[in-house]
Image: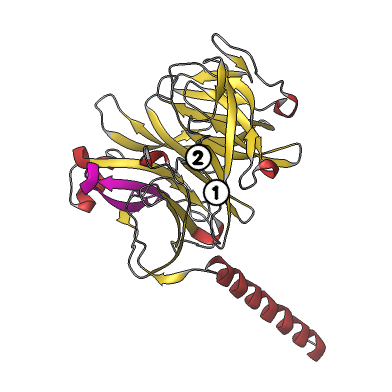
Amino acid sequence: MLPKTRVALGLLLALAVLAGSLQGADSTTGLTKGTPDLKMAGALAFGPNGILFVGDPLSAAIFAIDTGDRPSSPATGELKVNGIDEKIAGLLGTTAKELIINKLAVNPLSGEAYLSVSRGKGPTASPAIVRVNRQGKVTELPLKDVLFSKTTIPNANEKTRTEAITGLAYVNGKVYVAGLSNEQFASNLRVIPFPFTAADRGTSVEIFHGAHGKLETRSPIRTFVPYDIAGETNLLAAYTCTPLVKFPVSQLKAGEHVKGTTVAELGSGNRPLDMIVYQKGGKDYLLMANSKHGILKVSTEGIDKATAITKPIKGTAGQSFEAIKDMKGVLQLDKLDKEHALVLQRGDDGALSLVTLTLP
């Protein structure tokens, strides 16, 4: 090999190593070593390089925690754990009856599942985060002497504190937070840059609820997902009873009041629980878990040109959807890979399990 070639190859290798180091460093920018003072572990979302965002509605705060979970490639294969509530309870020294599983998220880098939980109930409950690998091993995420950062959200709702943060998502360097504020128009969406800066008062959001036949400004978003529509990032948000609404993120500015576009009414008497976006056969769909309607597969076709629902609706309207009848008892879900979802499912006996399901 010629000397110049060796030098060039050496330089390229050095640059590659440097780039990898910078990428690793970037993932922990703004984080400091310490112990997050979580009062409650609620909503979860993954950001860059295994950074886990945790919503703590009792503290009105968002935490960014470095899980250190960034292997060179994600695990593969089915993830299934029967009686996951019993296993977590045993790990944490409590009982399944005294355990509440608040949220499920899958780290896309590793394929491991993370669950935020509460040990006990009421004011004495304590938070924990556990992770589950593909072999079904359950471990507690250490929260002592870890790299983390925290930002506190202002004007968080005080009367219904657990709804101060109802959902999180990370997109392109920003954390999106749904919840209730103390403002006159309480339903709120916040945009917080990461690494964290001071959170602002957020954007109050208004929707027309077809099943209720009126405008609403105080109903909380129950679950939401980011989704690009015609080249622009939107948040698709679901509310109780069950309107589906789109909000362009470009309109979410501090102190502003924004009206979303109601693109579907999916049935009343229901509470949406969780939602993901996936692709099947070259088309995009939403998969939504619900308290009453089970799993709904909602088409996004034509959503960019959807006519807003602005009048009272009996039954359903807007985006087409179908019920997936063989998916019962699903409480939480997240994408496991391109073809599968991981769900937290309650069986007929009341026990909770983590189950891998093929995306319909």
Q: Give the range drawn in magenta.
A: 112-136
* SS under mark 1: loop
Q: Could you say where residue 123 lies in the image, as x and y percent from the top left?
A: 23, 46
Quick check: can you spot residue 339?
Answer: no
Q: Residue under circle 1?
A: 201
Q: How far apart are marks 2 and 1 (CA)?
A: 9 Å
Disc number placed over residue 290 in the picture, else none: none
**Nearest the eye: 335 or 275:** 275
State which tag comes first along the sequence, 2 or 1. Answer: 2
**Nearest the eye: 58 or 278:** 58
Is residue 308 rendered to the left or right of residue 206? Answer: right
Vertical placement of residue 258 versus 50, above or below: above
**Nearest the eye: 246 or 360:** 246
- Answer whether residue 123 is magenta in the image: yes
Q: Could you say where residue 267 lies in the image, as x and y percent from the top left?
A: 50, 16
Vertical placement of residue 6 versus 66, above or below: below
Residue at image position (56%, 62%) is 197
Disc number placed over residue 183 in the picture, else none: 2
Q: Dividing the image into 4 quarters, which one contains the N terminus?
A: bottom right
Residue at image position (53%, 32%) is 359
